[in-house]
Image (tube, rainbow, N blue to C red):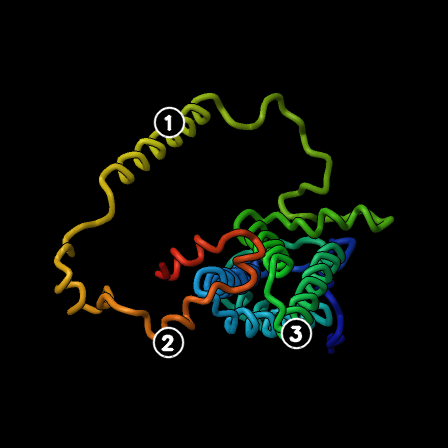
């Protein structure tokens, strides 16, 4: 019977315990999506409740990962999704170190936002750090936390995704051919032209009739704002702290 608290799998032919990188990336994606939704909801609508809930879910998942990734909900679901794919075994020690950093960030958010209801730039920084770590993991297979493993551990990381722990074969150049660079430059130019055209044509029309707007509920009738609107349009402290008061009003339809 396997040890219920064993971190990583013992696979023949591998010098250290390993994890399936495909499962890890799937689990990171499963956490990244609700994290991004709750973060943007807090940023644009000043509704922090989804973020507070996500912090609790994130901490439970990370705590279970630290005991044994087999019991973490995101790893269970992610593993089931990629169950028919060939496993890609990577070293478990550096993953545990990286997830420990995630657990510390989650604990900070639990103390600041969930228990003490603190809303400010520090929250934004911690949330942005978590989002960045999860995005790099799920999108590129790059574990940023794992890169710090070698700094704090005498034994160097082994079996990194893509073989980056081993000495790579260096080739001249940046690994991007000149025609590919030209395509990127043209793409940026096309994007710039497209933005200029969109800005020049103005917002979508078709609703110039005020009566039509009011009937559709898209624009309130002119007059003094109601008490509910006044309460809704109170600028939160975090937006004032980072100098985004006007931007917050614009995003929330407040004049």
For mark 2, give the secondary structure.
helix
Q: Which residue is mark 3?
A: 116
Q: Is there a contact, CB below 8 Å, between mark 2 and mark 1? A: no
Q: CA distance from mark 3 to mark 1?
A: 49 Å
Residue 217 drawn at (x, y percent): 21, 69
Q: Which residue is mark 2?
A: 227
- The reply, left or right, for residue 195 in relation to residue 135 is left
Which residue is pictured at 51% across the width and 58% down the height? 85
Q: Which residue is mark 1?
A: 186
Residue 248 drawn at (x, y percent): 44, 57
How crowded pointer 1 is (Cα within 10 Å; few <14, some 14-19, many 20+) is rated as few
- The reply, left or right, for residue 229 in relation to residue 28 is left
How crowded pointer 2 is (Cα within 10 Å; few <14, some 14-19, many 20+) is rated as few
Q: CA distance from mark 3 to mark 2?
A: 27 Å
For mark 1, give the secondary structure.
helix
- The reply, left or right, for residue 10 in relation to residue 89 is right
For mark 3, give the secondary structure.
loop
């Amino acid at each position: 019977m396997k040890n219920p608290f064993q971190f990583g799998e013992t696979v023949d032919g591998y010098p250290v315990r390993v994890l399936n990188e495909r499962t890890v990336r799937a689990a990171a994606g499963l956490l990244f999506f609700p994290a991004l939704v709750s973060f943007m909801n807090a940023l644009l609508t000043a509704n922090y409740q989804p973020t507070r809930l996500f912090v609790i879910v994130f901490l439970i998942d990370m705590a279970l990962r630290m005991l044994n990734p087999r019991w973490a909900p995101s790893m269970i679901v992610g593993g089931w999704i990629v169950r028919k794919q060939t496993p890609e075994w990577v070293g478990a020690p550096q993953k545990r170190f990286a997830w420990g950093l995630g657990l510390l960030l989650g604990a900070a958010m639990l103390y600041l936002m969930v228990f003490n209801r603190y809303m400010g730039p520090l929250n934004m920084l911690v949330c942005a750090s978590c989002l960045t770590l999860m995005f790099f993991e799920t999108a590129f297979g790059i574990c940023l936390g794992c890169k710090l493993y070698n700094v704090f551990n005498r034994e160097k990381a082994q079996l990194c995704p893509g073989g980056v722990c081993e000495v790579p074969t260096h080739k001249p150049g940046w690994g991007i051919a000149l025609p590919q660079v030209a395509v990127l430059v043209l793409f940026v130019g096309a994007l710039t032209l497209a933005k200029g055209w969109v800005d020049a044509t103005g917002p979508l029309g078709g609703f110039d009739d005020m009566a039509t707007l009011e009937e559709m509920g898209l624009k309130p009738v002119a007059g003094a704002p109601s008490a509910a609107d006044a309460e809704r349009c109170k600028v939160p402290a975090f937006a004032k702290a980072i100098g985004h008061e006007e931007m917050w009003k614009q995003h929330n339809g407040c004049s």
